[in-house]
Image (cartoon, helix red, strand yellow):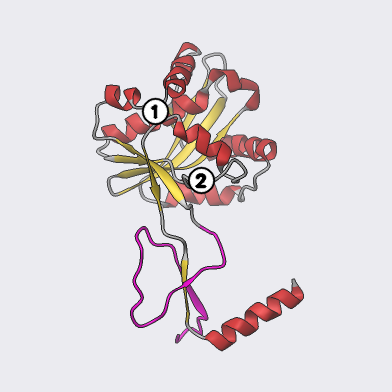
Amino acid sequence: MKERCLSLFLSPPIKLNAHRWPLAASPRHEQPEATRLINLTQSETEILKKMKPKGRYNIAVAEKHDVRVAPSQDIDAFYALLKETGGRDQFGILPKVHYGAFLRELPGSFLLLAPLPASPQPIAGLLGVVWGTKGIYYYGASKYAERASMAPYALQWAAMRHRKAHGCRVYDLLGVAPPDADVNHPWHGVSMFKEKFGGEVLTYPPEQQIILRPTAYQLLRMKRRLLG
């Protein structure tokens, strides 16, 4: 209140109970409604066994193409892949400085790149972070021309193995459509991709908000509607 804040937006992992300030449903949608978690305390054999058959098959295809995954600091190569992927799949990407800061400044961040033996240039990349005992997948990108190599599957499997070897207990695929969503959900396609790796779906409560200054908040919303 001292900073003239009008409203607080809360994206909790569990349902919140209101005490002093009443909670209301948020009008915006910033965080994933659900995610898919892989249990890394299992053996690698058990993790693979619990994947969908197509997931295991595509990992094997990547191995047959000799896709090699290795840690990297080459954010330029990753950003080039990300620009291609964003243009192809029609989603917005942030300036390169954002991904560079993610990798340099965020404790526990990691970048994996996957080249083919015939070329040093990567055909796919994965940017993630470790939080406590959880490895979290944040950004992925790949070359469409090399889609037959199934490099994104090799990357996810390498990320799971890498995080497991470094003590993580969970791998979070960060963001899927909720279980009751239909095929028109904007995350339907990426959810189908992540489903192939098995795991369990965790659904989050909807975003909540606490309106601290109701009159000023409503006036601001009216102004934005008039100008928008």
Residue at 53% across, 22% down: 150
Q: Is residue 190 visible?
A: yes
**Above or below, 55 relative to 5:** above
Mark 2 secondary-structure assignment: loop
Q: Which stretch did the figure color magenta?
A: 1-30
Rendering coords of residue 125 (x, y %): 51, 33
Residue 100 is inside the magenta segment: no
Residue picked out by circle 1: 158
Marks 1 and 2 sit apart, C-alpha to C-alpha, by 24 Å
Label 2 sits on what residue type? Ala
Rendering coords of residue 100 (x, y %): 52, 47
Which numbered circle lies on residue 177? 2
Tell me the quarter of the image containing the C terminus.
Answer: bottom right
Q: Tell me if 134 is positioned left or right of 174 in this view.
A: left
Label 1 vs label 2, nearer the camera? 2
**Above or below, 176 relative to 126:** below
Rendering coords of residue 11 (x, y %): 43, 62
Quadrant of res 220: bottom right
Rate crowding at label 2 as few (under 14), some (14 to 19) or many (20 or more) other CA atoms within 10 Å.
many
Instruction: Pick out the residue farthest to the right.
Output: 227
Quadrant of res 91: top right
Q: Tell me if 75 is positioned left or right of 89 in this view.
A: left
Rendering coords of residue 187 (x, y %): 56, 43
Residue 13 is inside the magenta segment: yes
